[in-house]
Structure formats: C-alpha cells, structure tokens
Image: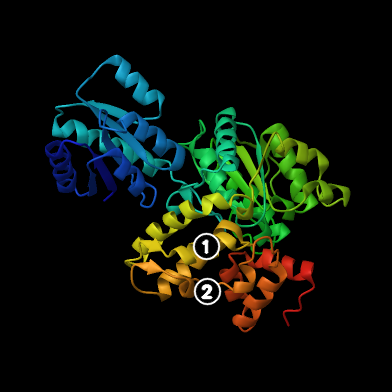
Amino acid sequence: MSRLMVVDDQESVAYSAAVLLRRAGHEVDVCADAESALKLVKVKHYSVVVSDLRMEKMSGIDLLKQIRAHVSGTEVIIMTAFASIETAVEATRQGAFDYICKPFRSDDLLEKIERVIDRQKDQPVFTVVDGDEVNGKGTCIMGESSLMQDLKSRASRAAHADCTVLLTGETGTGKSLFAGQIHSLSPRANRPFVAVNCANLSELLLESELFGTMKGAYTGADVSRPGLCEAANQGTLFLDEIGATSLAVQSKLLTLLEDKHIRRLGDTKSVSVDIRIIAATNADLPRLISDHGFREDLFYRLNVVSLRLPPLRERQEDIPALVEYFLLFLARKYHKQFRRMSPDAMQLLLNYNFPGNVRELENIIERAIVAGSGDTLGCADLRIGMADAVPGNNSEREHILRAIVGNKYNMRRVAAQLGLSRTTLYRKLHQYGINAR
C-alpha cells in the first residue's frame, strides 16, 4: 500500500479518483485546492500526488513546482481536460512524472500510479549511519528571510550544475536538509541519496563503509561487500562532518573526486563509480588546513560551490514560520491538539539565542507538545531558561552546563536535549573546559 493524494477543485472528480485508488489498496487523501495540498505534503510523505491542472489561486503546475522545491521522493501526475502537446511538455519539463487527460479510464490512472511505485521500489533512497532522512519531515526548508531566500536560490542553481558542494555552518542549521534538497532538485534526483556522518565512525570503519571490503581484508571481514560509494552510484553521496575524517580517508576521497574510481579494502582492482559528493562541516576547514589536519587539495575539490547556512539568531524573522511548521507536524505526530503559541511564548523564542539553532527550536517544541495539553503552548511549556532569553546573550557554555546538571550527567540525554550528536557535544565540552565527570 502506498500513500497518495488527489487534488481537484471538482469534488466529484476528486472523490471518484480517490475511491478508485482506495479500492486498489492505497491510502488516499483528498484536497480541494493546491494551497491545502501544499501544507499537507510538507508534513506527510506521499508517493504520488495526482493534481488537476487548472485550479483557482494556485494551478497544478505551480503546485508541482512547490513540491519539487520543498519535497523529495514524491512524484506528481497532472490531470487535465485541456490536453495538448504544450501541456504535456510543460508538465514534464517542470518535473511531472506523467499527465493524464480527463475524462480518463480507470485502468490508465492505475497503470500510471503503478509505474511510479515500481520505479520508487527499484530506486530506494539510502540513509546510512546518522544521516537525516531525505523523505519525511526533513524535506521542508522553512525561511522567507532575505538570507534564506538567497541561500535557497543559490542551492537550486548549484543542484542543476551537478558539481561538488560544500555546506558550512553551525550544528543544527540544516546542512543535511540542504544536502537532500540539492539532490532532489538535481538531475540525479531519481537515483540513490546516501548519507554518512563521518564523525561517528572510526577511521577503519569509515574507510570500510565508504569503499567496501574484500573478505579477509581485516579481522572480522568474513565476506566481501560493496561500500557506500558503490551504493550511491549515479546518485549523491553526502559526507556530513567531513572535517572529522582522517588524512588517509581524505586521500582516498581526493582520488575518488579526481579519477572517479574507488578500491575496496583488500582489493587490487579499482571500481568505476559515478557519484556527486556533497560535504558538510561545522569546522573551520582553512584553520584545519593550516594545522595540517585537512588536505588543502581536497578542500579545493570540495569547495566548487560553498554555501554557508546562517545560524537561527541571524534570521530571527523566520522563527514564527518555523514554529508554525513544527507545531503542525509534531501535533500530528503525537496526536495532540496544539495549533498555536501564545504571544508571550513567541516573544520568548524571538528573544532566545538558540545555540542549537533550528534543531534546538524543534526539540523545545517537541518536548512541550509531548508533556503538555490543550491547543496553545505558553511560556511555561517551553522549558527554556529566562537567562538565555536575552537578546544578544551568547551563553552556550552556561546552556550546556544547565543541561548537564538537569540531566544528572547523563550525556546521552544531554545530547538529545541540546540537539547535538554526542561527538559534537564532547567536542564542545573540551572547547569550553567543562568536566563532565
């Protein structure tokens, strides 16, 4: 069973299509306009959206463009009573999987739906280690500030260029979301997206995961198996925390970028791969280069297009939209009635410095929704210290210390509360000279 959506302002057409698809065993939602459909598709994953072409306010083509810009893994089939070669060309040029003329035969629509689903089964999206999912809630990049508008425009242009991209920025700014978005807008969108967090693996394990192993290459290598580079062939490999890789792994990545070949551990033969690399880091790579911790030649290979993701404190005007999005998504997830935030609570968030950025904002709202009740979140629900809610007060160290004490030195819980990986948390403890026992 797949989850589908039918969008048509003609109720009879929408519901007849929905009945047909439900009888075929699919879960189907119906929307009477493109605006409602767009809100829903951002918080709920659909395999296919079947949309009418001509609707008031927002057309099917405009809905298609928005889905392509904000959601990956969802295909669109356009319905039209105004069939022409121009309609078909425009719809497919904008990324539609197919189009169908109204009135259509039941078998025709079912056949198109099954073709989409079959292709999605044959081309899965991979997520490895701690990489964020490309499908699901992680597909929506919110922000209408000038900073984010410029960033999304540059990311879109980079996506079509099929070059390496380096994403920089603090933890929690959304680097993995942008990596997934660049992939979904690229010519490789229908091929695998493989994500790996380089900081979470030892040098040997990371090398083995990336490049694969031959049987007997090291103790415990009982079978030969391909690595993530081969799994990502014709698609995208996302290397998160690239600054945490060893010089030995960096050398192999440089060879991959230059020669498009990899060699499994313990093998004497090379394998040709066609992959695009997107890398991300919160580290200062030029400083690492000067400290001989990162290869300068690899840096220039990765840095063809560089996108800096701004911290949330630099785009506070985006906070209300982010809050609305997380409220809607998380209330649905936990089957709660929350729909709004009190003015005082919103002001508290607007004044907060967010050392953990968007990820921290999401965690704050998620904790409040899980623990609370009613339809409105207030200041008491948010559980953030008033000392932190002072404009311009950069108190990350104190914020971490309060989290450690509040969680009784349980570092797993501290990392979860702060929205950090444990590797990043321990790096910050060392940076601030915090003894966590």
Q: Looking at the image, which residue is at 71% across and 39% down? A: 302
Give residue 388's position: percent from left, percent from top.
63, 69
Q: Residues within 10 Å of mark 2 (few under 14, many from 20)?
A: few
Q: Is residue 137 above or below residue 276?
A: below
Instruction: Report whether residue 226 is seen.
Output: no
Looking at the image, residue 388 sits to the left or right of residue 327; the answer is right
List the single residue furthest toward the top. 85
Which mark is first along the chain, 2 or 1? 1
Give residue 139's position: percent from left, percent from top.
46, 48
Q: Give the structural element (helix, strand or loop) at label 2.
A: loop
Instruction: Give me the disc on residue 417.
Output: none
Instruction: Give me the disc on residue 383.
Output: 2
| Nearer the observer, 287 or 131 | 287
Q: Looking at the image, which residue is at 14% across and 42% down? A: 15
Q: Give the structural element (helix, strand or loop) at label 1.
A: helix
Q: Quadrant of the C terminus?
A: bottom right
Q: Quadrant of residue 24?
A: top left
Give residue 390's position: percent from left, percent from top.
64, 66
Type of amino acid under label 2: Arg
Using the numbered discs, state the Cα–Cα distance from disc 1 to disc 2 in whole angstroms. 14 Å
| Nearer the observer, 152 or 101 | 152
Instruction: Give me the disc on residue 347.
Output: 1
* Front label number (1 vs 2): 1
Looking at the image, residue 378 sits to the left or right of residue 338; the answer is right
Q: Is residue 218 above or below residue 368?
A: above
